[in-house]
Amino acid sequence: MKEKVLTLLTLIFIALSISGFTYAQWNDTIVVSNTMTFDYWNDSLNMGFVNPLICWDDETTKDVGKFNCYYTDLKTDSVTAKQANETLIITTTNAYPGYKVHCNFTVENIGTLPLHINETGISDDTGGLTFTGNGTSADPWIGIDANGNPIFNITITPEVVCNNLSSGETLEFELTICITQNVEECHTYSFQVKIMYEQGT
Amino acid sequence: MPHKKYIILTMVLAIYALLNVFHPGTLMAYIFPSTCWTILALATLWICGFQRIQSWFNKRIFFTAALISVFQIFALIDAGLITGFGKTAVSFTPTGLTINLILVLSTLLGTEFSRAYLMKNFGKKKPFLTLGLVTLLYTFINVSIFGFLTFTDPLAFSKFLGTGFLPAVTENLLASYIALLGGPIAAIAYRGPLQAFQWFSPILPDLPWGYETLLSVMVPTIGFVVLNQYATQRLLRRIGIKTKTTKPRRLSKPEKSSIKGWTIVSVLCVLMVWTSTGLLGFYPTVVASGSMRPTMEVGDIAISIKTPLETIKVGDIIQYWQEGEMILHRTVEIRGEGDARLFITKGDANPEPDIDPVQVAQIKGKLVFTIPKLGWISIYIKTAIINIWLLLSTNTTLAYATLTAITLTISIYIIRAYKSRPSYWQRKRGW
């Protein structure tokens, strides 16, 4: 009996705490972000970047810029035990106008259900750059600095959006970065590319 | 017939093997698992009979299971209010909804009917062993056993344990126990709402994996302990586990005072949580910077109340949100009228007013009084938590060791909770 009363009290305490907390929070604002890491709770729907990741630039003799590409945020699908990365990070350093970097990356559906790529996104978490466009050849992403100058154009070919992937299927894309005339000397630019997807039916 | 239980067990194992080996594409990705689980559900129903399943139903266990499920969903939503929400990847087209409904329903029925049948048939002689084995079997249907062999990075392994394996173990442990005590309907009452939330909610909490592990493990563990309290001798006898009756006894004096103590502590804790979140109409905030010196020192607790905006005058100290931070500064100028008003603020110790004016929507309240020094406790605790978190996030081995220690503690706690149930010892000692 004592244990039951204690359990009941604990439950009441937890429930009241949560309801009070919920009320207080909802009373203010609720923020719904437009992207999320989809590995939570629904491992049937899971996609990410996988190897190979091959990056190169057009310059072979002159030192007119440096680049670094890598995947990060490794996740594992608990049903298939396959691994993939959530984010592709590309950094260019000390690049001169006209410098071009190419990056071949691969995405894989590591879940068990079919997926449909519905959106791509690009961001600079340091806040130094804003972006326009949608990353296609027709409307490339343009990275714009704090002064409003376009710094680089980015395209992904073939078009990423509207592709469907069955479980275990992979797709390869090429991302190209072209540095414009407004680039600042001795400056490092870094940005993240994310691919958003939904269940394919 | 006794061999029928082995037919169901074989079917479950066959489905486990099939689902792990075959991952067909397009529409077959839905048809294949749905068919497997539907066949299993129908086979169990045919072998078991609907009347027998009805006889396993227990109203109290059913409602407790549903409550635990709702509690888990609320806990997840609450966590989402702190960390944020995100759009689900699940399709919400009519076709998508129909396909998902069939997939979720067939999986739920197949899983819970077979689970309850196995628990009821194997669990009478050795309930504890059956509980463990059935839990593991259904866990590995959801989580690949090969996942344990593929890791090279300890952090990735910890993440896999935290977000995949441990939540699956605790959820299946609770579902198996519910199935033993209340049959498949009660187990569906627990897992159904969770599945519905996962598959049919347009937004889901976007939790960092540490939060996810904590909630997904702790709530079913609490649920298990709660349910264990309902495993009365009468109920255990009803489901075929033999126990002997003991006389009910009155509570002793220390036990009564302990309950009183718990009540007081619970009420105080609730009040503390409500107060800190502003539910009671005032907001306590710990002063973390010296910008309002000498009016407020670092470590003071500032109490603000919600107040009509018309009553805020130049000279009042207002509390407001700016770029994710709560700030307390003095109003030095008010521009505009109505909802378009802008409040120019300045810290008493700052030489210039703040650059960004405060908009009406940002304001939380007006300062009424301060409690000196009391906020240092909060600052020390916060610093300690941040330091521990930094230590764990930079040292993967330590993080892995900590997670293992937590897992072991929870496992030991569950086993002890189960074994400390009076009926367990009565059976063990043959009373």
Image (cartoon, coloured by chain):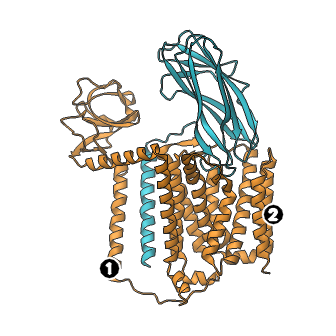
Secondary structure category for the residue under label 2: helix
Please say whether residue B66 is visible from this viewpoint: yes
Q: In the rendered structure, which amino acid carries the disc numbered 1?
A: Pro
Mark 2–mark 1 distance (CA, rounded to whole Å): 56 Å
Q: Which chain is cyan?
A: A
Establish if A152 lies above or below A18: above
Establish if B154 lies above or below A57: below
Percent of width and height locating residue B153: 57, 45
From the image, which quarter does the N terminus of chain A lie in?
Answer: bottom left
Percent of width and height locating residue B347: 25, 30
Q: Which residue is mark 1?
A: B254
Q: Which residue is mark 2?
A: B39
The image quarter containing residue A16 is bottom left
The image quarter containing residue B355 is top left
Q: In the rendered structure, which amino acid carries the disc numbered 2?
A: Ile
Q: In this image, A21 relative to B29: left or right?
A: left
Q: Which chain is orange?
A: B
